[in-house]
Each structure stands twice: as structure tokens, then as C-alpha cells.
Image (cartoon, grey):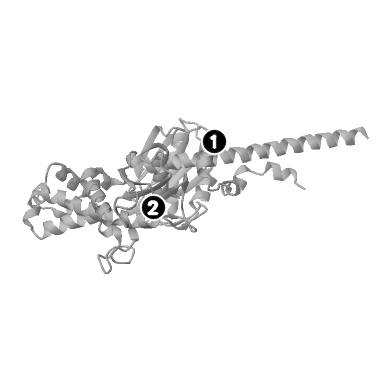
């Protein structure tokens, strides 16, 4: 039989089992989630962004800080997260915290199995943060949280089968079907950037060769531009002059800016990246058959300079082209805040279940108190 201790044990000691009850019925759940403010955290290799987000996806307040050096212990990053949440909690009634981490997150959405830019290896991030905060915590991959945000509030609204591709330093991705993020058996689905598209091609930091992100990403864009500049190619004179001969200063945003100004080499490089993007999307369409591809990440700022060639290549390489419906390819609408907004919105699902579980514990305690009081009254009357 339950004891008084069962009813009065600290909430934090039972938080993890409560959070693990969060199932995959996200589509139905988000419709009944409490309309309360939550905090979203987006952790990348260079920055940690935190914001208070309402139930309509509006950012009420945003904070940003640099990511602590990756050589430091995981606790340093955890300290940064906690400080940001506590700062926001001083001015907002926060009911839950969602974290989008750039790394592999296990199926229970607790442990960061591996983060390429941070020293997290099988790190129980959710439990560590939950122990230090008075609200429930949810952890997910940052591409999953971004895809959720685009489906709820951005370019993916109304789509039941959506694939998001994030083009940054590398390529990340997420799959969303019928309002559910498909995380895979072990939680690491969506690592599209490491599909092999060129056997024996460029070496990838993952250890393999010919990965998709070596041909369609921010790193690929910058690598090609620097190689042309280092070879003193006539087509690179414009960008060489722009950086005053300092080839190491060439960056992705700079290439995009020069392309918009009409630099022929930069336009061509973005077309090359876009064509490889279209090839990869055609492969994903053959495997997943979604209705919509949402292209996000920093490289997507090139817009039609990139996405136009991607659409053309997609149509050329799509299996069964001409005899099947074609998925839409659109640019993400929420920009760099998508991961933060999605993490906050997913956290609202945990807030609802947490509050319901807490209410049940209170009700059980009240029933026990009534039972104990009736028993004392009976004993006193004897």
C-alpha cells in the first residue's frame, strides 16, 4: 500500500518517469497542450540561443550567448543553459524548457549520444538540467525541433508528409509524418548529410568519402571558392579583390552577397551547390515520398540562387519523373529561430503531461489525507 512518503516525495525525484510517458502522438497532443509560455534553447557549435515562446509561436524575449569552448566539460554548457533559463524566468512565468541540441539524441529524448561541436558523449542532458530547474525539460535534435516549428508555424503548415533539410556547415534533416517527428528506433534518423552520393569522393569529417554534405553545404561552397582563389583562377578575381588577397577570409555569406551583386563565379558556385541539393532531394523523394521539402539553415539565405537550381536538378533526377506527383521545395520561413521555437513548442507537450501527473499526485495525496483523517476520527471515537 502507498505510504505518506509516496505522496510527499520531492517532485524532482519522480520527474524523469513522468517525462518518459511522453509518447509519439504529438499531433493530437499539441492541439490540447496548455497555452502557456515555455522556453526554447537552441545549442549550436558557436552560440546558445534561448527564448520565451507563446502558444502561437511568438517570441516574447530572446537571449543569446557564445557556446563555451568545446574542450571544456559538459557542465560548462549546462551551466550556460541554466543561467539563461533562470534569467528569462525572472521576467516570465515559464512552465517547461525544450532544448534543441546539435547532435544525436536517444529515442527517450534524454541523452545526447554524440555532439560533433561539443564534448557530449552519452550525456544525460535532460536529467541533468531537470535536476537544476523547477520545471520539466525536453531534449531533441535541433533539426527535429526546427522541422516541428516549420510545420506548426512556418513553411510546412498544412503538410502531412514533410522533410526538412538544414544547410549549414554540413547538412542536417528531419522527417515529419502525420504530425509526428520520425526519430527512428534509436533516435538518430534524419542524418541525410552522410548519404554517399560520390563513391570515393571528398573525405568527410565523419570518416567516410563522398557524403552529400561534401557537395551541398556551407563548407562545400567555401571550399570550392577558396580552391579557385588559391589557383588564381581568372573567374575568382572578383572575390580575391573583395578579400584583398586573404583567401582565408572567404565565407559563405560573402559568396551569397557577391552572387546577389552579380559576381559570375559566386552565382555559378551556388548553382553547383543547388544542383547537388536537387540530386539528394530526388534520392530522398524516392525513399520517403513526402509532399514537401523545406530548406533551412544559413545557406538557404541564397534563396532562388540556390533553390532554383535545386528544383531543376530535382526534376531531372526524380525517379519516375513525369508519371508521379512532385513534392514542393520551399525555403524555411522562421530563419535561425526555428530550432528555438520548435523546442519551446514541443516542451508544451511535456508541460501538459507534467501538470496532469502532478495534479493526479495532489489528488492522491488529498484522498490519502481524507482517509487518514477518517481513520483517526474512528480511532478516537472508540
Please identify the quarter of the rendering in which residue 341 is found. top left
Mark 1, residues whose alpha carbon is within 10 Å: few (<14), some, or many (≥20)?
few
Q: Position of residue 254 (x, y in %)?
A: 18, 46
Q: Which residue lies furthest to the front in this view?
A: 323
Element type where label 2 sits in the image: loop
Q: Position of residue 74 (x, y in %)?
A: 43, 53
Q: Distance between the residues labelled 2 and 1?
A: 29 Å
* Left or right: 275, with 231 as reference point: right
Q: Position of residue 210 (x, y in %)?
A: 28, 64
**Label whose residue precedes the other's in the sequence (2 or 1):** 1
**Frontmost residue, 4 versus 189:** 189
Give the quadrant of the C terminus: top right
* Left or right: 121, with 233 as reference point: right
Please identify the quarter of the rendering in which residue 230 is found. bottom left
Instruction: Let me know if residue 277 appears in the view.
Output: no
Q: Residue 289 carries which label?
A: 2
Element type where label 1 sits in the image: helix
At a point 75% along the width and 45% down the height, the residue shown is: 3
Amino acid at each position: 500500500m502507498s505510504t505518506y512518503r509516496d505522496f510527499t516525495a520531492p517532485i524532482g525525484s519522480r520527474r524523469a518517469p513522468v517525462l518518459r510517458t511522453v509518447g509519439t502522438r504529438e499531433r493530437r497532443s499539441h492541439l490540447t497542450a496548455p497555452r502557456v509560455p515555455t522556453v526554447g534553447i537552441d545549442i549550436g557549435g558557436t552560440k546558445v540561443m534561448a527564448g520565451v515562446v507563446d502558444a502561437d509561436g511568438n517570441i516574447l524575449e530572446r537571449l543569446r550567448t557564445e557556446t563555451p569552448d568545446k574542450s571544456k566539460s559538459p557542465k560548462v554548457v549546462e551551466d550556460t543553459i541554466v543561467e539563461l533559463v533562470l534569467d528569462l524566468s525572472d521576467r516570465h512565468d515559464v512552465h517547461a524548457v525544450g532544448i534543441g541540441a546539435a547532435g544525436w539524441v536517444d529515442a527517450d529524448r534524454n541523452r545526447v549520444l554524440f555532439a560533433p561541436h561539443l564534448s557530449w558523449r552519452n550525456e544525460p542532458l535532460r536529467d541533468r538540467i531537470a535536476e537544476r530547474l523547477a520545471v520539466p525539460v525536453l531534449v531533441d535534435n535541433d533539426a527535429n525541433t526546427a522541422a516541428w516549428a516549420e510545420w506548426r508555424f512556418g513553411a510546412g503548415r498544412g503538410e502531412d508528409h514533410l522533410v526538412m533539410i538544414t544547410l549549414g556547415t554540413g547538412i542536417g534533416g528531419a522527417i515529419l509524418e502525420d504530425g509526428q517527428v520520425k526519430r527512428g528506433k534509436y533516435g538518430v534518423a534524419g542524418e541525410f548529410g552522410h548519404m554517399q552520393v560520390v563513391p570515393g569522393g571528398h573525405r568527410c569529417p565523419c570518416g567516410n568519402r563522398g557524403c552529400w554534405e561534401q557537395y551541398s553545404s556551407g563548407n562545400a561552397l567555401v571550399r570550392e571558392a577558396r580552391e579557385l582563389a588559391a589557383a588564381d583562377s581568372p573567374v575568382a578575381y572578383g572575390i580575391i579583390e573583395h578579400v584583398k588577397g586573404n583567401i582565408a577570409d572567404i565565407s559563405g555569406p560573402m559568396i551569397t552577397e557577391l552572387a546577389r551583386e552579380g559576381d559570375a563565379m559566386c552565382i555559378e558556385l551556388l548553382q553547383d551547390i543547388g544542383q547537388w541539393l536537387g540530386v539528394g532531394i530526388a534520392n530522398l523523394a524516392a525513399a520517403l515520398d513526402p509532399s514537401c521539402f523545406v530548406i533551412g539553415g544559413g545557406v538557404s539565405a541564397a534563396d532562388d540562387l540556390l533553390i532554383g537550381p535545386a528544383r531543376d536538378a530535382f526534376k531531372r533526377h526524380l525517379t519516375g519523373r513525369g508519371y508521379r506527383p512532385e513534392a514542393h521545395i520551399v525555403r524555411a520561413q522562421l530563419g535561425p529561430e526555428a530550432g528555438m521555437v520548435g523546442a519551446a513548442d514541443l516542451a508544451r507537450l511535456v508541460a501538459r503531461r507534467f501538470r496532469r501527473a502532478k495534479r493526479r499526485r495532489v489528488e492522491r495525496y488529498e484522498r490519502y489525507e481524507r482517509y487518514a483523517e477518517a481513520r483517526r476520527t474512528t480511532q478516537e471515537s472508540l
